Amino acid sequence: MAIATYIKNSLVSSSMIRKMFEEGTRLKKQFGDDKVFDFSLGNPDVEPPPAFHRVFLKLAQEDAKGSHGYMPNAGYPYVREALAKKASVEHGVNIDGSCVVMAVGAAGGLNSVFKAILNQGDEVIVPTPYFMEYRSYVSNHGGILVETPTLPDFNLDVGAIREALSPKTAAVVINSPNNPTGRIYPQETIAELSALLTKHGEKGGRFPYLVADEPYREIAYKPVPPILSHYAESIVVSSYSKSLSLPGERIGYIAVGPQIHDREDVISALIYATRILGYVNAPALMQRIVAELCSARVDVAVYARRRDVFKQVLDDAGIEYAEPEGAFYLFCKAPGGDDVAFVEKLKQNLILGVPGASFAKPGWVRFAYCVDEKIIRASAEAFKKTQA
């Protein structure tokens, strides 16, 4: 028996990010960890804040009866209430726990959203560059991803989104701060996009959902504008992978706007999708932990210092980049314009980055600076060699 054709085709073009990460593992074994400059994977190396360890130990020691059993598929009610308060503050709205569904990371949350809202052949608009697994997430549930360009500074091109809207448009996905550019979309742009989607809905009768993928909201060097207060049909998906450095724990949540149409149906669909996709519920222990850590986060100043050090390294090497306003990536122009060739040249100097083509933006390369500052500084000469 053969594997599914779709999966077979997908394996051929599977994540370059993971491939480069695996290449880094091989090179480190060959040359040593301190000789390889691996900027391929956005895997936070900053440890969770001390409060996480305190709460983790406290809850593990309590180990109340039934604490590892099933709970409602949407999550513990008190956890949902805690995160609703958090989302209310961040987005300038007033929602309660009924508007929150706990998720298995942001990836699980996005799949639950697409399962809940997409009919076969529905379209989902996404501005480029973007995290390429969006394509698979949408395809998983019968949707079609429609790419639109961004402006030269990587801000949203609302005009391009306008041209892409159609009667089949079910959603527009935005990611701010953005992976891979670090761009934060300004409030006036969010307002313009919201007005566009409202007008489109009023004209055609179908209001596209605005789905905001926000795992980097708290890794930001300037304020991140709210989403839920701008557009009624908004859904925010977030996680604690970056803000608490817990990517392996797979804990996140979905928050829907208080004015969303058919709110009870939408939330019921999200809960049902979470169950039938096989997640059943978000991890029980992690739910209880994050409920006590709503105001905690990693030290963002660490990432800001690394960004500045890395910028200096790239400046000295004569490599242009987009100014990151959040997240922990530097998106750089590939000298000569060929991102794949430049990545190969980097690899010869034991530097690992990811071609922009992996984010639907050829001609650029992404470097993740969630690595020790010493590695960034030590890479300076290797970067200069690539330009020689």
Image (tube, rainbow, N blue to C red):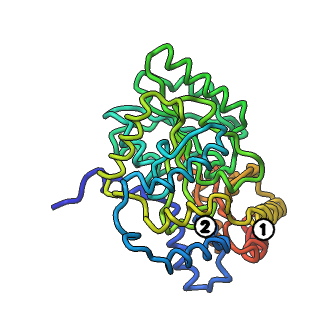
Give the numbered dot on residue 245.
Answer: 2
Whether 253 is drawn above or below 316: the answer is: above
Q: What's the residue type where badge 1 is placed?
A: Lys
Label 1 sits on residue: 384
Q: Quadrant of the C terminus?
A: bottom right
Residue type at tag 2: Ser
Disc 2 is placed on an element classified as loop
Q: Is residue 19 above or below residue 363?
A: below
Report crowding for label 2: few under 14, some 14 to 19, many 20 or more residues within 10 A (C-alpha). many
**Quarter holding residue 52:** bottom right
Residue sitting at x 54%, y 66%: 289
Between residue 296 and residue 13, name the one nearer to us.
296
**Which of these two is toward me, 188 or 138?**
188
| Residue 252 visible from this viewpoint | yes
Q: Residue furthest top?
A: 203
Residue 190 rendering spot, x and y as whole percentages: 66, 32
Position of residue 157 in the picture relative to residue 285 (left or right): right
Image coordinates for residue 300, horizontal then vertical, percent: 74, 62
Q: Residues within 10 Å of mark 1 (few under 14, many from 20)?
A: some
Which corner quadrant holds the N terminus?
bottom left
**Residue at horizontal 55 percent and vertical 74 percent from the top:** 56
Q: Is residue 295 above or below residue 95?
A: below
Which sits in the foreground, 255 or 5? 255
